[in-house]
Image: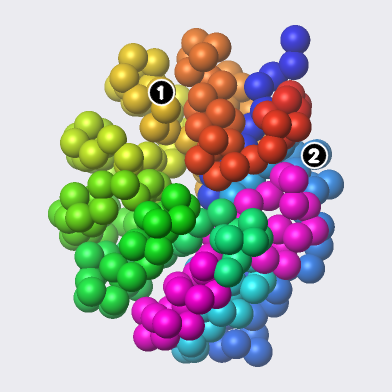
Amino acid sequence: MPYPPIIDALFSIPRVGTAQQIPDCIPLKQDIGQKMNSEGVAGAVVAPCNCSLCQHRWNCADRRTHEVQDTVARSPKRLRGLACYDQLRIGDSLRWIDSAVSKGELAGAYAQAEFCVSGVNSARMYPLYGLCARMRAPMVIEIASQNDWTYHRPQVEVVAADFPELDIVLAPPERMDWASVLRLMEQFPRISVLLSPEKLRQDSTLREYIELKGRERVMFRSGLNGWPTSVETARELPLGPAARLAYLAENCSKLFGFPAEVMSAGV
């Protein structure tokens, strides 16, 4: 019997070395379809490169968005892309995100919490949330560390309360108090979370949550060691068939709009 398909709910475009400025950025040119086949991944949601050390970080959001679009265009059935948002060019950002999502070139938007001007719930972020809510496009928010989670969690609560129709997908750090994440999800029904199978294997409380309460709210994200290790771990998880399928592929497929053939691609 084939394994359920596995869709990585957040895959950042890889880089060579550490980018310091725009000329140092090396766009992903290869078609990653063959790599996905060999490593057991049926689909992936592509996020912009973090570029956290780039001195031009605040003015290359459009460049990173176009890079995601180009990557997705090479495997449009198996990849979904997330737009980058420039908080200092709000009007331009909303126009390019609106256009890309309306045309089906992108599936949602992406932000790193620690680089949101004045916080996740700042006034400059609210136009993006309003656009995503109107377009029924998920908003993915990545949090880098436990300290960042402690600082930004109350802000996420404010955003979720202000935009009850917005699908918020949290990508929290692996090492943190996951009980606080589950409490947030219980409070706000449209918050989902990305979770690596390595962490899920270690934490029986998280597995119990998926089985009994939050089956539709948790999605696969590969761990630090990459696809092969995470895929192997995912296939060995002690989850029931329904919870396994929901975690590995079904939830992500519904939220980001993967076609039926990706869901039927047992690998």
Name the element at disc 1.
loop
Is residue 120 rendered magenta in the image? no
The residue carrying mark 1 is 215
Q: CA distance from mark 1 to mark 2?
A: 26 Å
Please, what is the three-letter code of the amino acid marked with disc 1?
Answer: Arg
Give the image location of residue 202, x and y in percent.
40, 26
Q: Does residue 179 appear anywhere in the picture?
A: no
Which of the two discs, 1 and 2, sits closer to the camera? 1
Locate the C terminus by quadrant. Answer: top right
Range of residues picked out in magenta: 69-98
Give the image location of residue 259, x and y in percent.
69, 38
Above/below status of 215 relative to 108 = above
Q: Earlier in the sequence, mark 1 or mark 2?
A: 2
Judge left or right: residue 37 versus residue 248.
right
Quarter of the view holding residue 26: bottom right
The residue carrying mark 2 is 37
